[in-house]
């Protein structure tokens, strides 16, 4: 059985930076927490908790010490509250997410009706919206939702960093029919595009696909969706323990990819377990 592992599987730059900042901060001799999970990997979050970095959902529940800001970012209001309570922020926000926040704010300041391509309830999306300082932002998941938007004089578009380029392109096409002036910032992370392209290529060659990453990870879930469209025998797993030998019946080529929040040690365990089925 042949195993094809995606070259870019695992941590992207932003996630690697965030985890390094969090583990380094954990070495300081003071109370520390993260506002929401630092990344969407329950296994990494657990390791940080063992180092004393507990997850807190609300700023008002933090009494003192350091606060690690997750890679997805937080809202402008939460950041203001952190400073108001004299807490020490450790800003692990992904630089690509910060760009999306800045571009959304710029578009609002210049009078554009902002369309944000993404998942309405995702923390990154909620954070981006907050930096428009109360302006109305239309969050659309896909072309169908975009078609229900009203016509506007000027439309400005940004995207959640883990969206697919094809989805952004389709929403933009719809908006071009709804306004004479459309300005688009492609805020999709390069690492996301690379991972999705690799996943498509491998899924076309494999008899079975494993997509490794947190079930709460948007980019991993999207990778699984992309692979499943090309290879129905696609399984989204978090760890090697979830692999079922029965999946591999008659599979000669197995493709493996992983989300941007998936640590290397988990990927290695998955590869090792799949390789063991050959014996």
Image (spheres, rainbow, N blue to C red):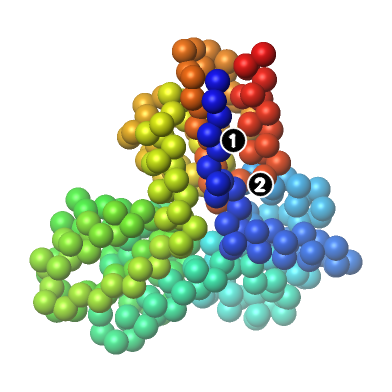
Placement of the N terminus among the 4 image quadrants = top right
Q: Check disc 2: other Cα within 10 Å, few if <14, some if 14-19, many if 20+.
A: many
Residue 78 placed where, x, y %?
57, 71
The secondary structure type at the circle numbered 2 is loop
Q: Check disc 1: other Cα within 10 Å, few if <14, some if 14-19, many if 20+.
A: many
Placement of the C terminus among the 4 image quadrants = top right
The secondary structure type at the circle numbered 1 is loop
Q: In the rendered image, which residue does mark 2 sit on?
A: 263
Residue 39 placed where, x, y %?
61, 54
Residue at 34%, 73% (x, y): give it: 185
Gap between marks 2 and 1 measured at Cα: 11 Å
Q: Is residue 84 above or below residue 241?
A: below
The residue at the far bottom in this view is 110
The residue at the far front in this view is 2
Residue 10 placed where, x, y %?
59, 48
Q: Is residue 100 left or right of residue 38?
A: left
Image quadrant assignment for residue 37 = bottom right
Q: Earlier in the sequence, mark 2 or mark 1?
A: 1
> Is there any visible trace of residue 273 in the rendered image?
yes
Q: Along the line of sight, which residue is nearer the eye, 103 or 3?
A: 3
Q: Is residue 187 left or right of residue 269?
A: left
Residue 25 placed where, x, y %?
78, 66
Q: In the rendered image, which residue does mark 1 sit on?
A: 238
Image quadrant assignment for residue 91 = bottom right
Residue at 17%, 66% (x, y): give it: 175
> Is there any visible trace of residue 74 in the rendered image?
no
């Amino acid at each position: 059985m042949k195993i094809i592992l995606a070259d870019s599987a695992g941590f992207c730059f932003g996630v690697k930076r965030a985890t390094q900042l969090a583990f380094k901060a954990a070495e300081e001799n003071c109370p520390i927490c993260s506002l929401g999970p630092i990344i969407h990997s329950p296994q990494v979050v657990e390791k940080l908790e063992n180092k004393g970095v507990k997850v807190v959902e609300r700023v008002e529940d933090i009494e003192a010490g350091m606060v690690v800001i997750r890679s997805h970012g937080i809202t402008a209001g939460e950041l203001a509250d952190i400073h108001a309570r004299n807490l020490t922020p450790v800003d692990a926000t992904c630089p690509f997410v910060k760009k999306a926040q800045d571009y959304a704010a710029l578009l609002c300041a210049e009078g554009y009706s902002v369309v944000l391509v993404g998942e309405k309830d995702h923390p990154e999306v909620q954070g981006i919206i907050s930096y428009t300082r109360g302006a109305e932002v239309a969050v659309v998941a896909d072309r169908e939702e975009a078609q229900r938007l009203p016509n506007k004089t000027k439309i400005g578009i940004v995207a959640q960093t883990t969206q697919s380029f094809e989805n952004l392109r389709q929403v933009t096409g719809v908006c071009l029919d709804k306004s004479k002036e459309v300005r688009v910032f492609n805020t999709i992370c390069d690492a996301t595009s690379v991972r999705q392209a690799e996943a498509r290529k491998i899924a076309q060659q494999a008899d079975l696909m494993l997509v490794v990453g947190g079930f709460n990870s948007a980019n991993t879930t999207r990778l699984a969706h992309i692979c499943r469209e090309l290879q129905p025998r696609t399984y989204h797993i978090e760890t090697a323990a979830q692999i079922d030998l029965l999946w591999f019946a008659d599979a000669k080529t197995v493709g493996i990819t992983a989300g941007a929040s998936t640590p290397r040690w988990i990927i290695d365990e998955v590869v090792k377990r799949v390789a063991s089925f050959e014996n």
